[in-house]
Image: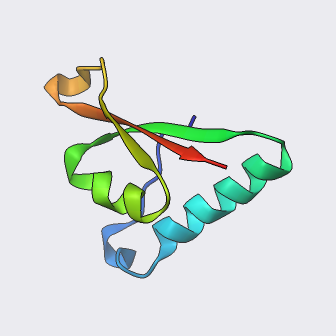
Amino acid sequence: MIYSIAIDPAYRGAGLGSRLLAAISERARAEHRETLSLTSLERNVPFYQKNGFINRGVAMSDHAGETWYNLVKPL
């Protein structure tokens, strides 16, 4: 489960978030994990999909009064 990733706004668009997710994926595979999962706000869903995550729909969480989406990446 990925709880949070964040990139300083000054460095967004440089591929750092995708590189972080790739490193997390590599480590998880090395530890024989089968999937990665996270919840995300709708505005970030396309980024995660671009990085191999599948949108599984609206999460039960209503944290901060927001709608969250469950995303899973098969490894």
Residue appearing at x 57%, y 59% in the figure: 21
Q: Is residue 9 found left or right of 29 in the rendered image?
A: left
Image point (46%, 38%), residue name: 38
Q: Is residue 69 visible?
A: yes
Horizontally, residue 9 falls left or right of residue 33, namely left
Q: Could you tell me if residue 2 is visible in this image?
A: no
Q: What's the image's color scheme?
A: rainbow
At horizontal 76% and vertical 53% (from top left) the residue drawn is 27
x then y, percent, for residue 11: 39, 77
The residue nearer to you, when weighing 61 against 49, is 49
Q: Residue furthest left?
A: 65
Where residue 33 sits, quadrant-wise, is: top right
Query: In the displayed structure, would residue 41 be above or below residue 26?
Result: above
Residue 42 coordinates in the image, percent (x, y): 21, 45
* Image quadrant in which the N terminus is located: top right
Q: How many marks?
A: 0
Seen in the picture, residue 8 relative to 57 is either above or below; the reply is below
Query: Is 61 displayed left or right of 42 in the figure?
Result: right
Q: Is residue 75 above or below residue 33?
A: below
The image quarter containing residue 61 is top left
Residue 15 horizontal/vertical position (percent): 46, 77
Q: Residue furthest bottom?
A: 14
The residue under the point 20% across, 52% down is: 43
